[in-house]
Amino acid sequence: MQLFNRYVSPRGLTAFAFEIVLISGSLALAVHLHGGVDDLSAVLWKIVVITAICQLCFYYNDLYDFTLVHSHRELIVRLLQASGAASLVLAGMYLVVPSLILGHGIFISSVVLFLVAIVAWRVLLLHIGRAGQLQQRLLIVGTGPIARKIARQVLDQHDYPYTIVGFIADDPAMIGRSVLNPRVVGVSSDIARIVREQHIDRIVVGLSDRRGKLPIDELLQAKLSGITVEEPETIYERLTGKILLDDLKPSWLIFSDGFRARRLTRIAKRGLDLLLSGVGVICAAPLMALTALAVRLDSEGPVLYAQERVGEKGRVFTLYKFRSMRVDAESGTPIWARDQDDRVTRVGRVIRLTRLDELPQLWNVLRGDMSFVGPRPERPFFVEQLAVAIPYYRQRHAVKPGVTGWAQIKYQYGSSIEDAREKLRYDLYYIKQMSIVFDITIVVDTVKVILFGKGAK
């Protein structure tokens, strides 16, 4: 469970696990109500497959993201959409694999059962999540930009059961003033009293400059009494799935957990790369041939586009893509690709939207230039600019670049230094938490990005 908590909130995991039971139980009950079966093993595999498809459709409709699904209306709308999608997928599978059919009318009955059960369960879960007794009570030390950013992030999310009691300021005159929605409740000398009276569970130290301002004795006393004391980078990472770069100190990168890609992890990752890219080349061969033909017929120029990119440890390699722009799209100084770029051809717009232009990069993965999952490789010209403008930018080259990645699925298409800075937050998080489980999660999410046309292009 702890392994998955890096990528999915405890509430999301709880909902996911319990809904496996609700869906499979509803299917089994529907089978029983329709007369049952003599051989349980004959329907057990069908229940497992149908449950997995339903769960996948729920996941792709963001039903396990409680920041998005935090109202009854949003829950019902997304639940109906997911159930409809599952019905369509299963109808298609029934045509290909008729033996998957449970029986006449059984699936419809099970849908009614699990819709009622899941709505009741989710309403209960939402109310439990809002119960004050189950909320972790946060005290934020500081009132500056970082403290405000953490507070805003806590207030905007619904995945973690946190409630902010207030802020600690260094000026007694600020007591009672509102910083955001919470107010200043005291100064450093008041921490012990506030912890005791307000039943604080967690203290976040949000001071930009700690020199002479860090209440060491008060924080140490709180920690020894069982209160969790943590830095803003830690809670921000947990809430957002990215690294807080604002005033980030090298010591945090050095001493924090993570950023240790073990040899076994790298070997397993390379094995996964070879498996996925090998299967991908074989399965996508007909699609690649059709894409190449479409590119050739649509505009003059080569089918493939080769471009230098910066890879692991700063090594430059040649990346291959299906050409999606005019041959004369760029002359002289390199420029960033833009959203709705007028240099993109008609076929280019389609293959960029569907990610078909990325398929030749499977060859880069097979060669070892790239991994299937990793930070997006950038051109040397832009790397030099971004490394000057953005602290820690070169650290993203600690691992192989990827065809897909955490930043690509979490952040929309961008073409500016600020966009690159935001993506770096996600890239550093990926490098910090890199694992095979994380890679598989990203691959699954990439399918969702392609289906719904989101993310980087």
Image (cartoon, rainbow, N blue to C red):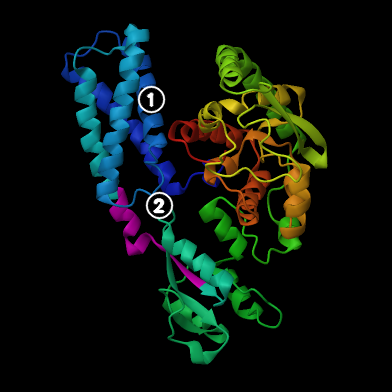
Where does the image place residue 240, in percent across and percent down from the top left? 53, 53
Q: Give the amino acid at mark 2.
A: Thr
Which stretch is magenta?
125-139
Which type of secondary structure does the marked residue at label 2 adopt? loop
State which quadrant residue 293 falls in. top right
The residue pinned by badge 2 equals 67
9 and 375: which one is in front? Answer: 375
What distance separates the C-alpha of mark 2 from that of mark 1?
A: 23 Å
Q: Give the amino acid at mark 1.
A: Ile
Q: Which mark is residue 416?
A: none
Q: Is residue 129 magenta?
A: yes
Residue in the image at 40% along x and 73% along y? 181
Where does the image place residue 259, in percent across and percent down from the top left? 71, 47
Q: Is residue 281 above or below residue 70?
A: above
**Residue with the most extreme bottom position:** 173
Where does the image place residue 150, in percent across and percent down from the top left? 52, 65
Q: Please, what is the dominant secondary structure of the magenta stretch?
A: helix
Q: Is residue 371 magenta?
A: no
**Lower sequence index among marks 2 and 1:** 1
Q: Is residue 99 above or below residue 251?
A: above
Residue in the image at 40% along x and 55% along y? 158
Q: Is residue 278 above or below residue 448?
A: above
Q: Residues within 10 Å of mark 1 (few under 14, many from 20)?
A: some
